[in-house]
Image (cartoon, grey):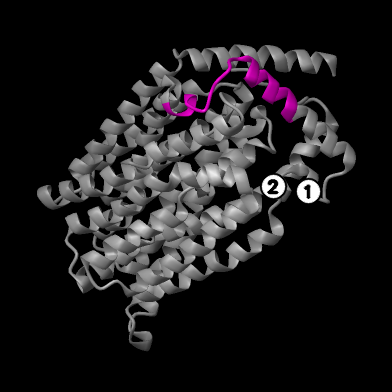
């Protein structure tokens, strides 16, 4: 794939891209860091909460999956609303509502309230991630999108890298203060950043380049030319109606591929602390050790995204990262009695899973434009997040049934292999081949005129 619409040899274009990166990405990373932390902090809460409110491994897994049911049902409607009202207002709304629901998680009393609040958290957050992907596609050209997405999505492993030790310290350090358990304080403390940042969004986010004062008139004009060139190139590859977002084989295969990726990230997020806890460590030590796979995952995301952009290739980068994750999960399953080796397996698996996430998200907005792209991104993400319904319940069942995490690793391995199969089928789809040819030809022609 060779979708060049920005002159990477131009000092002006390079400076423009660098300015966009520094002005946009750090704040979006902070938003996603908080979002992901609030989504998965039940993995640490479970170390105390499950016993306190009487949750079995199966009930915990089912409750964790309720988030993704709400997420799935409201994902596409939320993203279509965002396309109409703008990212600034809608992302602010998303953050404020999920902050409120996350705060309420401190007061669950049993299975029923746990299930309801997890469902409402999914409803509240629906549309956030796909909305950000569409937002990035309106500011950054295709040839920069994997590296931009990679830097942005470092927020996922960072939420584990930074959030894990903090969560562990809160569990131990604040347990019993004010009559509340450590897990309750964790939900309360970690909810407030979302509430505060929701209001900050209204001030800092801009829906389009013309609304910002930190770009010069020449920079705005050049960015407009770049993005318009790409839009026309994609439109020339086919007249795709909104229904394309829900029926095209390429879109469905991307949804299936991301399903496998999210299965891996969900499993790591929800069961990593429990796996390390089974080694016999305290909650605080579990927090610090849980941060290690996330650290390596963050490094892999950035380097793999940059390498994919440099080679202007996506498919084999995705297949390679899936293969790496598969190896890591097999190592984990076979070395649970050797803690250092099991940790190595977790690190390798995290690197592969998180690297694949980056490369995949550079594809949907490289195939389609406009409302069709917004709907496709939301649909792909909603399909993929159904794995969040399957993963916690399936992994919780395997853990309770076998009494070990060995079977869990092999389940992960199977989904990584399935991801490879989906990618091999995707590269043969007409939409992928047409968009690749058309965007490359049109973009190169635009550069020659420049």
Q: Does 35 sit left or right of 282 as displayed?
A: right
- Quick one: SS at disc 2? loop
The question of residue 123 being in magenta is answered with no
Horizontal and vertical percent position of residue 314: 52, 24
Residue at the image position 30 percent from the left and 38 percent from the top:
329
- Report the residue marked by disc 2: 207
How far is mark 1 from mark 2, CA to CA? 7 Å
Q: Which residue is depicted at the point 74% across and 23% down?
A: 229
**Residue 339 shows up from this direction:** yes
- Outermost residue to the left: 401
Q: Is 240 colored magenta in this rendering?
A: yes
Q: Position of residue 36 (x, y in %)?
A: 46, 54
Residues at marks 1 and 2 touching, judged by CB atoms closer than 8 Å: yes
Point out the stretch of residues depicted in magenta.
227-246
Q: Answer with left or right where residue 408 lies relative to residue 244.
A: left
Horizontal side of 98 relative to 400 (left or right) equals right
Tell me if 250 is positioned left or right of 435 in this view: left
User: Dividing the picture into quarters, in which one does residue 321 lie?
Assistant: top left
Q: Is residue 437 above or below residue 108?
A: above
Asked whether 378 or 260 is in front, the reply is 378
Crowd rating for badge 1 (residues with CA inside 10 Å; few <14, some 14–19, many 20+): few
Residue, disc 1: 211
The residue sitting at the bottom extreme is 178
x and y, in percent, of residue 386 in the image:
33, 41
């Amino acid at each position: 794939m060779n979708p060049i619409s920005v002159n990477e040899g131009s000092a002006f274009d390079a400076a423009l891209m660098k300015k966009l990166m520094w002005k946009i990405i750090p704040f979006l990373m902070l938003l996603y860091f908080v979002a992901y932390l609030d989504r998965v902090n039940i993995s640490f809460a479970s170390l105390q909460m499950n016993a306190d409110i009487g949750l079995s491994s199966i009930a915990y897994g089912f409750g964790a999956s309720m988030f993704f049911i709400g997420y799935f049902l409201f994902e596409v409607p939320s993203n279509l609303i965002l396309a109409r009202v703008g990212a600034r207002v809608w992302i602010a709304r998303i953050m404020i509502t999920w902050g409120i629901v996350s705060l309420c998680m401190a007061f669950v009393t049993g299975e029923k309230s746990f299930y309801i609040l997890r469902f409402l958290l999914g409803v509240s957050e629906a549309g956030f991630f796909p909305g950000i992907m569409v937002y990035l596609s309106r500011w950054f050209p295709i040839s920069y999108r994997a590296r931009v997405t990679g830097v942005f999505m470092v927020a996922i492993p960072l939420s584990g890298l930074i959030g894990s030790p903090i969560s562990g310290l809160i569990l131990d350090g604040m347990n019993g203060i004010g009559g509340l358990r450590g897990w309750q304080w964790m939900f309360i403390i970690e909810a407030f950043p979302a509430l505060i940042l929701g209001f900050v969004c209204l001030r800092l986010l801009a829906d389009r380049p013309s609304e910002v004062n930190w770009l010069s008139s020449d920079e705005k004009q050049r960015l407009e030319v770049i993005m318009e060139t790409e839009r026309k190139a994609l439109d020339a590859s086919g007249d795709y109606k909104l229904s394309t977002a829900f029926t095209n084989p390429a879109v469905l295969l991307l949804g299936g591929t991301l399903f496998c990726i999210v299965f891996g990230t969900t499993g790591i997020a929800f069961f990593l602390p429990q796996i390390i806890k089974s080694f016999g460590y305290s909650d605080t030590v579990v927090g610090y050790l849980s941060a290690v796979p996330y650290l390596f995952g963050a490094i892999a995301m950035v380097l793999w995204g940059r390498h994919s952009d440099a080679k202007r290739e996506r498919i084999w980068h995705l297949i390679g990262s899936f293969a790496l994750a598969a190896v890591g999960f097999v190592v984990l399953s076979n070395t649970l009695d050797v803690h250092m080796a099991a940790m190595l397996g977790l690190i390798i698996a995290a690197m592969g899973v998180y690297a694949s996430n980056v490369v995949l998200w550079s594809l949907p907005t490289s195939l389609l434009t406009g409302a069709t792209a917004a709907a496709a991104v939301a649909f792909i993400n909603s399909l993929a997040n159904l794995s969040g319904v399957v993963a916690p319940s399936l992994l919780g069942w395997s853990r309770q049934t076998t009494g070990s995490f060995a079977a869990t690793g092999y389940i992960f391995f199977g989904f990584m292999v399935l991801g490879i199969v989906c990618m091999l089928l995707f590269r043969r789809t007409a939409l992928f081949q047409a968009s690749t040819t058309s965007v490359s030809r049109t973009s190169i022609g635009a550069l020659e005129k420049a």
